[in-house]
Image (spheres, rainbow, N blue to C red):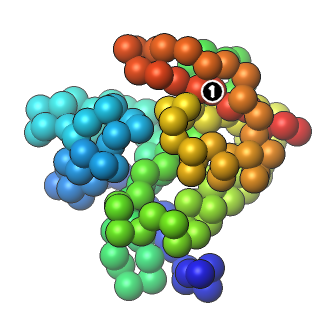
């Protein structure tokens, strides 16, 4: 297990498009997110929205995740959830070579402690593809519970809420 490894989080800046594009052009990685890799135009569009969401609050946004050797592992988000009052949404994306190494748990732990410290009165939710067994298991380990399943934006979707 890599639990002894340190990871660090850095908010996306406008100059980070290439880093972002690197992450989202892998079909496997994006399978449960958009259903497929993003082309440059799609990635650009999404990246613009990421920067907008990050400008709302210094503690919120999308963050690049690095290990102690400055290797980009993936990214994660802690953002306002617009569908549920006073709630935050967490999410993460890891490059394929870092799957099943404990990084998802480390990222999840970080996001939950950030949200508890900085937004103690907010509920925390996550949105996944119902077929993404690994993500679902991880969220359940952290005490998330499924509350909605269906199709949203043409994608199979499941929403989970952190039990207080």
Residue 11 visible? The answer is no
List the single residue furthest toward the left. Answer: 40
Q: Quadrant of residue 161?
A: top right
Up/down of 113 relative to 53, above or below: below
Closer to the camera in the image, 160 or 79: 160
**What is the tally of numbered marks visible in this picture?**
1
At 11% across and 39% down in the image, what residue appears? 40
Closer to the camera in the image, 27 or 5: 27
Q: Quadrant of the C terminus?
A: top right
Residue 104 visible? The answer is yes
Up/down of 42 relative to 1, above or below: above
At 74% across and 46% down in the image, what residue appears? 140
Q: Position of residue 116 (x, y in %)?
A: 77, 48
Q: Quadrant of residue 158?
A: top right
How many residues crowd around disc 1 within 10 Å: few (fewer than 14), some, or many (20 or more)? some
At 25% across and 45% down in the image, what residue appears? 27
Up/down of 80 relative to 51, above or below: above
Q: Position of residue 120 (x, y in %)?
A: 80, 42
Closer to the camera in the image, 114 or 102: 102
Q: Quadrant of residue 16?
A: bottom left
At 52% across and 72% down in the image, what residue appears? 101
List the single residue furthest toward the right. Answer: 164
Q: Position of residue 9 (x, y in %)?
A: 48, 64
Q: Quadrant of the N terminus?
A: bottom right
What is the secondary structure assignment of the residue under circle 1?
strand
Q: Position of residue 85 (x, y in %)?
A: 70, 18
Question: Badge 1 is on which residue?
Answer: 159
């Amino acid at each position: 297990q890599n639990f002894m490894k340190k990871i660090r989080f850095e908010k996306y800046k406008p100059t980070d498009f290439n880093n972002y594009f690197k992450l989202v052009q892998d079909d496997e990685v994006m399978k449960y997110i958009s259903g497929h890799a993003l082309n440059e135009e799609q990635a650009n569009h999404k990246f613009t929205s990421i920067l907008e969401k990050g400008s709302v609050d210094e503690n919120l946004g999308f963050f690049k995740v690095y290990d102690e050797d400055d290797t980009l592992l993936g990214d994660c988000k802690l953002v306002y959830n617009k569908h549920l009052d006073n709630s935050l949404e967490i999410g993460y994306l890891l490059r394929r070579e870092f799957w099943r190494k404990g990084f998802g748990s480390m990222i999840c732990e970080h996001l939950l402690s950030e949200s508890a410290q900085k937004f103690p009165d907010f509920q925390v939710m996550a949105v996944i593809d119902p077929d993404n067994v690994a993500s679902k298991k991880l969220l359940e380990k952290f005490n998330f519970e499924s509350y909605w399943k269906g199709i949203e934006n043409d994608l199979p979707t499941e929403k989970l809420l952190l039990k207080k």
